[in-house]
Amino acid sequence: MHAILYMKKLIFFIAFICITTTSISQINEIGIIAGGSNYIGDIGPENYINPNNLMGGVIYKWNKNPRIALRGTFTFAKLTSDDANATNNERHLRGISFTNSLKEIALGLEFNYFEYNLDDYSKTRTPYILIEIAAFNYKTIIDGTDPSNYEYGTNTSFAVPFGIGYKTKLFGDFALALEIKARYTFVDDLDYNNSEIPSLNFGNPNSNDWYVFSGFSLVYSFGRPACYSTPY
């Protein structure tokens, strides 16, 4: 219930920003995202930024003005973790590992710290922060007693994403961005944790899983020129 209320508040906040922000021009950006992914939960290392697998996807942005962009991404990522790499001695001795994959759709806002405009050399780079809403689909284990007879299924859930980045013009209409995005989920079974299956009943049931994307996006800008002006 708390998760649903939080998501409703976040959706309302993003909608409010979109409605109340005005501009007289627009520009589109489309491109690819690539980099690394990692999981934080009941298995393996507990480092928040520790990319150990590949992630990739596509991104689209619509710049409302030089400070705010609406964006959508589709990302595919692999998640793995192994107690053999844990610094926690208890985990290291336990010796559990897992591999999962997920597909994520995220929508949100990108707030530029400085004005961003590819047509103005003095405004072609800026740090930024992200506020998003994400839905993701991942594999689960729904039945079985051991790895030889596990029955797999899928589940879809929501995450609260936030992140930071830095973007700059490369040449012409191309730009590059580096960013780190953390996702707090409302589930505890990205690692196949399942309290109804004894062999998969481990960890802290009161601590949900996280996953993190670290990488870059390469985008191409098109549409109307980036000749923004802010009304007075």
Image (cartoon, rainbow, N blue to C red):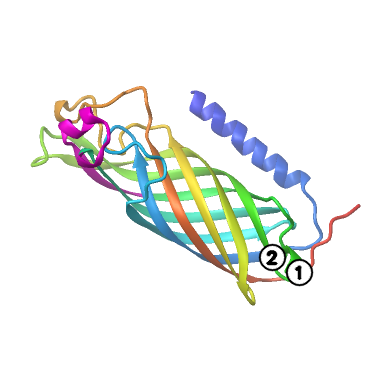
- Is residue 135 left or right of 222 when viewed as pictured? left
Instruction: Mark 2: give few (<14), some (14-19) or many (20+) Cα within 10 Å.
Output: some
Secondary structure at badge 1 equals loop
The relative height of residue 187 versus residue 128 in the rendered view (above or below) is above
Residues marked 1 and 2 touching at CB (< 8 Å): yes
Query: In the rendering, at what x and y percent does residue 173 appear?
Result: 64, 74
Residue type at mark 2: give it.
Answer: Thr
Residue 96, magenta (yes or no): yes
Circle 2 is placed at which residue position?
A: 124
**Residue lying at the far right of the rendered structure:** 232
Does 87 appear in magenta?
Answer: yes
Q: Residue at x 57, y 52 (%)?
A: 165
Instruction: Identify the amino acid type marked 1.
Output: Asp
Q: Is residue 22 above or below residue 186?
A: below
- The residue singled out by tag 1 in the image is 120
Residue 45 horizontal side relative to residue 218, left or right: left
Residue 148, x across and y down, in percent: 8, 42
Q: From which residue to which does the magenta span run?
A: 84-102
Q: Where is residue 147 drawn, in percent x and y? A: 11, 40
Q: Residue furthest bottom?
A: 172
Q: Position of residue 44 (x, y in %)?
A: 27, 38
Q: Is residue 113 above or below residue 208?
A: below
Q: Quadrant of residue 219?
A: bottom right
Q: Residue at x 20, y 40 (%)?
A: 84
